[in-house]
Amino acid sequence: MTSYLEMTIGKQKNIALIAHDGKKADMIAWCERNKEILQKHFLCGTGTTARMITEKTGLPVRGYNSGPLGGDQQIGAKIVEGQIDFVVFFSDPLTAQPHDPDVKALLRIAQVYDIPIANNIASADFMIHSTFMDQEYEHKIIDFHQNIKKRAEELKGE
């Protein structure tokens, strides 16, 4: 049987903002439209996107590396560490990305850790205007340590 851990996403969210080059203008415009909400939360993002959002909107966004230089992986690691609660990732579905495996890994890790992720303006709008944005949110994630321990014990018995 799978074990789960109860986790809480606090009232103040840790939000990662990521946008491929063809979607950076959309991300900046979205942040500007939602500035009043976003300024209540801690923001981070991949390199150029974070810098551009801060320059254009005045919102403080902690920058990691750019996506192709490991920024997606850094944000994925922060999800694993419990330091990111919410991801807005405006990906460009019409342009091939050289770091596509990193993007898929980030999306997978957000799924594994039950982190809300928006991949376009409509889903980002629905999420940021949700009643959950102003309150704590309880969710369950798989207790990987317990499940790994159990699996190791099962393998010993084989």
Image (cartoon, helix red, strand yellow):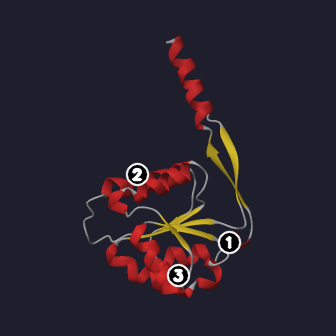
Above/below status of 144 relative to 137? above
The answer to which of 90 and 38 lies nearer the viewer is: 38
N-terminal of the two: label 3 or label 2? 3
Q: Residue at x 56, y 62 (%)?
A: 116
Residue position marked by numbered label 1 in the rendering: 133
Q: Kindly identify the amino acid type of the residue bearing the numbered disc 1.
A: Met
State the image coordinates of residue 107 (x, y, percent, origin top left). 44, 56
Pointer 3: what residue? 31
Residue at screen point 42% across, 53% down: 73
Hey, what amino acid is under mark 3? Cys
Residue at 55% x, 87% y is 33
Which image quadrant is residue 96 in? bottom left
Please rate how many residues cluster around mark 1, counting C-alpha atoms within 10 Å: few if below 14, some from 14 to 19, many from 20: many
What residue did someone put label 2 on? Answer: 105
Corner quadrant of residue 142: top right
At mark 3, the secondary structure is: helix
- N-term-proximal mark, 2 vs 1: 2
- Left or right: where does residue 76 sit relative to residue 39? left
Going 46% across and 82% down the picture, which residue do you hit?
28
